[in-house]
Amino acid sequence: MSTLFEEVRPSVAADDAVPVRRVELTVNGERRAADVEPRLLLAHLLRNGFRLTGTHTGCDTTNCGACTVLYDGVPVKSCTMFAVQADGHEVLTVEGLATASELHPIQEGFKDEHGLQCGFCTPGMMLAAKALLEENPNPSEDEIRWELSGNLCRCTGYQNIVKAVMWAADKLGANAESDGAGDAGDDAGGEG
Amino acid sequence: MALDEIKIGGLGASRRRVEDNRFIRGKGNYIDDIVLPGMLHMEILRSPLAHARIRFIDVSAAWAIPGVRMVLTGDMLAARNLAWMPTLSYDTQAVLATDKVRFQGQEVACVVADDPYIAKDGCEAIVVDYEPLPPIVNPTQATAPDAPLIRDDKTGQDSNVVFDWEVGDREGTDRAFAQADVTSTIEMHYPRSHPSPIEACGSIADFNRATSKLTVYMTTQAPHIIRAAVALVAELPEHMIRIVSPDLGGGFGNKVPVYPGYVVSILASILLECPVKWIEDKSGNLISTGFGRDIYLKGEMALRNDGRILGVRMHTDSDHGAFFSDAQPSKFKIGLMHSAFSCYDIPAAHLTAQGVYTNKAPGGVAYRCSFRVTEAMYFQERMVQAAASDLGMDQAEFRRVNLVRDDDFPHRTPWGFLTDSGQYAKCLDLGLEAIGYEDFLRQKAQARQRGRLLGIGISTMTEPLGAGNSREYDILGIKMFDSAELKVHMTGKALLRTGAKTQGQGHETTWAQIVAHELGIPAEDVLVEEGDTDTAPFGMGTYASRSTPVAGAAVSMVSRKIRAKARKIAAHLLEVSEEDIDWELGRFSVRGAPDRGVTIQECAIAAYSNLPDGMEPGLENNAYYDPPNLTWPFACYIATVEVDPETGVWDVLRVVAVDDCGVRINPMIVEGQIMGGLTEAYAMANMQFITFDEDGNCIGSNYMDYLLPTAWETPGFELHEVVTPCPHHPIGAKGIGECATVGGPAAFVNAVIDAIGDTGVRNIDMPLLPDRVHEAITQGHDVSGAPPVKTE
């Protein structure tokens, strides 16, 4: 386990002056633990500690949203949260969207509607979209544009991102309908 | 029998992108995702002042921090003759400051440490004593008689002028103005803007003492140029340098130049003999790296009463910051500013241009269109609107009168370029029809009676994309060709490499489509790789919308070389002479006996198993492509807006775009490029700029000050197309990536000026912030946005 945290732990002779805190959290459904400096940002724990590099850091000032993850289901900008604040909480990153065999409909929608170009904002954008669709399964274009306005994209001009979210909403709706026909108790998330 | 080209992902297929498979899973491989064993981390200490002499630097407290492995200052670099580096424009740039700092954010020292947090601690512990000097933030200040000399490091540099340049026919233009019925004049500033990809810059230098090999992972749009630059600057043998450009989180021109952070990380790796990673933060990116624009225009047009343009005069003053370090063709000092008015039939034109040093960040001048074409087209379309207004003529009709006609190609432009194709009037008419021009003019008149301000703005332009033919285009003397290498494996699958470097444009998808078009090998059977100088053929990289015009052409040409060899193999397999072989997509057959044939895949296995006597085995080749000319796409962008006279806020009602970029390889991707470009055009017109106060402080050094449009502000776009194939490109394609950013801004600004038209206001500088628009409406005068701004 020690190599896992090599990046985030001050490696200077385990300097006694540097305090370290134990954090335990659930990441993408898995229990994880790390010894971290209190000042370590959550984004850096995810990226460097757990090597979940799909969470990108763009602006360092909570504006761009590339680092968006779901924190107990709510989108947060992980570059402006300390790792220790996640102690005891659940975090979902882009790596937790797909199952081994199946993409999440939001991922399918982004690919099918050309909702990404360089791909750097995409993980944060998709997680913000996931939170939106869980709250509002049938959003209007305006609602999508408003709800995603905490995430910046420099490549696409957003039009195809809006289409991608609508694509995902349709697919999730269709999934929920067929699930409802087969098994009324099933969750509409389609995430597995 | 014949293959369906769309089904195999050939030309014209809106094929879904292969690169998306990793991006949507969070499995891209961007610079900060790369971790090497034993890697250290570097941070940069930047100057807080715009212009100051360095009295001393005390780094002792930084060295005392546990985990700090190295502290580098300009003096340490100077001892190794590395404090200054050559730029891509025959100037020099400080790597780390020695004598003076010349802009806010300039690199002063670097700290290498065990982790980035400690490296930042180290930077904060460094003490620098500065003696402030008066800062210069615009060309007027730079050329004032008592202006302080910014580049006192350069022998023979006795002013702040970088260059004076002129092009065109001075006397002929004077004659045109003498004959004019009306002379239209306008002045404006195109503000400094920053490309600002969401991912900033970074590098990981890894020097291996045992092998003498230097590997540098780097956010670069032009890895081979970087390899040459590193060879020259660091005096390392070029074959022992490997530059790898991984997935890039956007580029837009920001990742072309060589930055001090790259250079120092390389030096630190050589000195420490371990990998050194430098990841720039957003402020560092915005405050110090390649910007775009920052140029002033005095424009004049000689007009006849019937609407014909007789002549054009332009003078530009450009602000290059502290070092002249943009990449542009060495022949043209102000880039391709003289590509202005290329879509109009104008007898005489003259351009003078002066560039100056200021205490602002250097480099760039490229932002989703390099070589000053963006500014040229903006100035052109703003001048056109002012001229139409001065003549009292409808702005669409004024364009129609002056646009180059379809039967007038090839056409020599006012400053000597040769355009070769286009259907300009058709594009304009399609745009006007799509927006409902006549209807809108009626609505506008009716709204005006109720006190509402509606406006419509048009921008039509052709721009030179795809630098470029070797007669005219080079960077530091290196010709701007590009390359492709294709290896068809024995099972008919293929590996394609080019000298370009995708940053989101989708090369991995579209290059395979060109191979599919030329060879009939399904696109999904072609793996595309770029960005590693040890494996990719030499190329000049991706910027200036040059990938499809140059590297894309090379992909066609190398595929045709493969096809030519496969044809010989087919003749051998079919036991006929080569002249008796016909080609259809993916298959050779015997002329007159179409049932007797072999597929390209059968030729591939034969290349490794059953060759004609004397033929070299294998089915591989490469191609270097030197384009005969630039490509000249045409665009007509039309925006309608409503301006709130009480607040100066303006809303976009509709945006119509008609683009003619010739043959479209992947229409889905082309439309994505256009929408992205229109968004950046809207951004520059509405909110996005970097300015400076009197002390040279950069206003716009983070995303709270430097405003980028979100999904909420960004308007919807209605796209249309006209296809005029490029006559000299192998598949008839033209550049497209930058068209909308180039042509778009004028459509929005023209619309706002049109809306407030009866105030007599000719110009409001971009961005058209509400307070500027409000001032124009209420005061009835032009509004300048030139720095310095008052920050109170």
Image: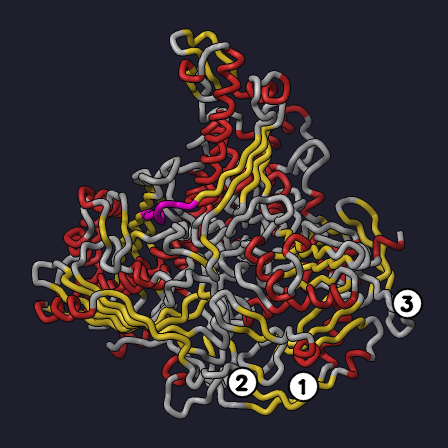
For the record, the magenta segment spans B626-633
Tell me where residue B606 sits by quadrant: top right
Instruction: Please tell me which residue lies in front, B765 or B439.
Output: B765
Is B133 placed above or below B410 here? below
Is B520 placed above or below B283 here? above
Mark 2: secondary structure: loop
Amino acid type at mark 3: Ala
**Residue at 61% of width from left, 79% of height from top?**
B97
Quick check: is B631 in the magenta stretch? yes
> Most extreme residue toward the front, as rendered?
B614
Quick check: is B34 in the magenta stretch? no
Spot occupied by residue B431 in the image (x, y as percentages of width and height)? 26, 46
- Chain of residue at mark 3: A
**Residue at 37% of width from left, 44% of height from top?**
B734
Of the residues under marks 2 and 1, which one precedes in the sequence? 2
Spot occupied by residue B652 in the image (x, y as percentages of width and height)? 35, 57
Is B672 placed above or below B396 here? above
On the same chain, marks 3 and 1? The answer is no
Amino acid type at mark 1: Val
- Chain of residue at mark 1: B
Tell me if B245 is positioned left or right of B643 in this view.
right
Q: Which residue is mark 1?
A: B128
Q: Which residue is mark 3?
A: A14
On the same chain, marks 2 and 3? The answer is no
Image quarter in which the N terminus of chain B is found: top left
Is disc 2 in contact with disc 3, using a CB cutoff of under 8 Å?
no
In the drawing, what numbered circle is on residue B51? 2
Is disc 3 in contact with disc 1, using a CB cutoff of under 8 Å?
no
